[in-house]
Amino acid sequence: MTNEPTHVLEDQEQVEAIVKRLKRAQGQVGAVIRMLEEGRPCNDIIIQISAVGKAINTAAFKLIAANLKECLLDTDQDSKAMTEQLQKMFLSLA
């Protein structure tokens, strides 16, 4: 077990929006697989893969933004540890 701070997103509206976006991305991945199996042109497949990547990145950024908002409102958090955790999350998407 690590000593890194953890935070569970409490805003259920944000959680639902992120889940919805990820489920859409999941459907897009299924479409990519079908396109490959059907022998569709590479250009079409790359466009769909790009859409999947954007959907996942948007979900990740929404999660980080919602987490940041909640962390800023939580005065009980160790600010240095929280800053380091948020930096790690942002950098993981870079």
Image: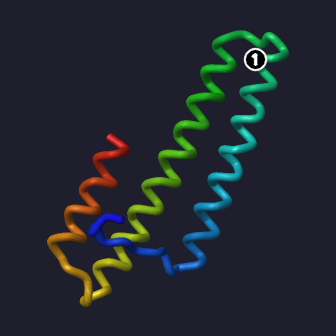
Q: Residue at x 28, y 79 (%)?
A: 72
Looking at the image, residue 78 sits to the left or right of residue 38; the answer is left
35 vs 74: above or below: above
85 vs 37: above or below: below
Q: How many marks?
A: 1
84 vs 26: above or below: below
Q: Residues within 10 Å of mark 1 (few under 14, many from 20)?
A: some
Q: Residue furthest bottom?
A: 76
Q: Residue furthest front?
A: 1
Q: Residue furthest left?
A: 80
Q: Quadrant of the C terminus?
A: top left
Q: Residue at x 30, y 72 (%)?
A: 5
Identify the image's colour scheme: rainbow, by chain, secondary structure or one colour.
rainbow
Q: Quadrant of the N terminus?
A: bottom left
Instruction: Measuring from the top left, give residue 77's x and y in whole percent.
Output: 25, 82
Instruction: Measuring from the top left, give residue 19's x and y in whole percent.
Output: 64, 61
What residue does disc 1 label? 36
Instruction: Measuring from the top left, give residue 16's x and y in whole percent.
Output: 64, 69
Looking at the image, residue 39 sits to the left or right of residue 61; the answer is right
Q: Residue at x 62, y 24 (%)?
A: 47
Q: Tag 1, which secondary structure?
A: helix
Instruction: Measuring from the top left, give residue 88's x and y in whole percent.
Output: 27, 53
The quarter holding residue 20 reads bottom right
Looking at the image, residue 66 sits to the left or right of residue 71; the answer is right
The amino acid type found where label 1 is placed reads: Leu
User: Along the line of sight, which residue is nearer the eye, 29 or 1?
Assistant: 1
